[in-house]
Amino acid sequence: MSARKAKNSRISKSRFISGTQCPLRLWYDIHARHLAAPPDEGLEAVFATGHAVGELAQKRWSGGVLVDGPYWEVERAIERTQALMADLSVPAIYEAAIEHRGVLTRVDILARAPEGGWDLVEVKSSTRVKEPFDTDVALQYWILRGAGLDVRRAGVLVLNRDYVYPGGEYDLDQLFHFEDLTADSEHRLGEIEAQVFAFQEVVASEEPEVEIGDHCFTPYDCPYYGHCSRDVEFSEQPIDWLPRLGKKRDELRAIGAESIDEIPDGFPLSNVQERVRRCVASGEAWVSPALGRALERVEWPLYFLDFEAAMPALPRWPGTSPYGTVPFQFSCHSQARPDAELEHSEFLATSDDDPREALARALLECLGEQGSIIVYSSYESRVLGLLADAVPALRGELLALRDRLCDLLPVVRDHYCHPGFRGSYSIKAVLPVLAPGMDYGDLEVADGQAAARSWLQMLDCADAAERERLENALRVYCRQDSLAMVRIREALLRVVGR
């Protein structure tokens, strides 16, 4: 093996997980890390959440000691860990560095078990154990057992979705839930060892040849996808434009159909999939004869409503739970009658108080007692239900709003199809086709996840100018969503000559 390949070829836990996704990703992690795309704001936010949850979890084992220092000082970290393990006064070690057969892990929490031995605790900012968490723990169990540790329990510490925050300090025993994976990890010892040896062969060999595919996005988006796909000529009309393909995707690829025009006649598709296929093939829009009637099923005045909500991993206000949905903003465009001017109302919580009651009261004042409330998807109905639960004094009035909802999404999906939608009926796909010149490309906040991140960032920001910038970006984005429904409905009315 060349000196270049020998450098930094130790397999870490994260690199092992990379290998389970794709051997080429593992090889790049060690030999060509510079080819990876930098993490975007969404991924950075995930990392920040994981760090915050991890630090909080450590407090469950008071008196524990952190093995700190630069990540590249591996030997120092291993020596420090061994010293702490030998010190019986240390009840737990955070980020313990342990190596076995060239495979390194930094155990989130290595706690002394009451009966002797050690508990291996992997902390995740999730509410359930999912792939590849079990593989993550199984690998660490293999390392620790191989290094001679007496591991009594091995598992994942996750957030308890049922925990309702009462205010004040968190009850850490209730906030977290431990999922014991010891038996599974013991059962997989042979499997993990075989994978380790296989991955070490990959690392020591030349760059493997792996074609791009679904594995590039499962269980995580691969940071090397842009590099691996740089010379790939993608179909101009890929089969992925067909909604909800599921297993049919594999069936189509098995017969060599990568493009919509390569789908053979008679291949079983749903009504919506077949509609998209014909629309794309013809290059012309399809209009249902019932579109006009569907658009007329409204009661004036009309209110076009959009919510934004955040789902903080750690509950921020009393009465909320981990990843509980907390609405913080709405935008509403209204029209009293067909020939009337549009009016706009909005609400955005700008103080670090529970926003739900203030939002609910502003919403009820905005929407009045009659008229259709136009939405796009069932999301607003769900949010109204959550608001009703959160503000019992207004429960009846909030739930009554549900009876006035008119969902524009099924109207579009069932009665209109355009090749420019590319098989998607999301508002971001439909809007620029039906209302040219309107899109989300130039917005600082361009989707719901970015809105939630920006709002939480605004609440925590001490800089007045930055807070104002984030507030303006949020208002512009939410206003665009409610106005988008107005423009989509207007465009569809023109299609039917209304």
Image (spheres, grey):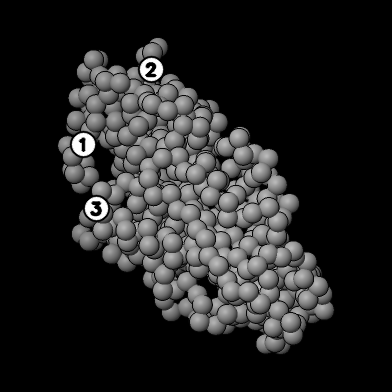
Above-or-below relation of 257 to 119: below
Marks 1 and 3, how far apart at CA? 31 Å
- Residue at the (46%, 26%) spot, across then down: 166
- Residue at the (44%, 35%) spot, across then down: 317
Q: Hey, what amino acid is under mark 2? A: Ala
Label for residue 463?
3
Q: Hey, what amino acid is under mark 3? A: Asp
Marks 3 and 2, how far apart at CA? 46 Å
User: Image check: 429 left or right of 143?
Assistant: right
Q: Hey, what amino acid is under mark 1? A: Asp
Label for residue 113?
2
- Mark positioned earlier in the residue sequence (3 or 2): 2
Residue 66: horizontal and vertical position, in percent?
A: 24, 31
| Image quarter of residue 100 | top left
- Residue at the (19%, 25%) spot, across then down: 83
Above-or-below relation of 498 to 459: below
- Residue at the (78%, 76%) spot, across then down: 292
Q: Secondary structure at mark 2?
A: loop
- Taking depth in this image into account, of 28 and 197 the one nearest to the observer is 28
Residue 367: horizontal and vertical position, in percent?
A: 62, 55
Above-or-below relation of 336 to 458: below
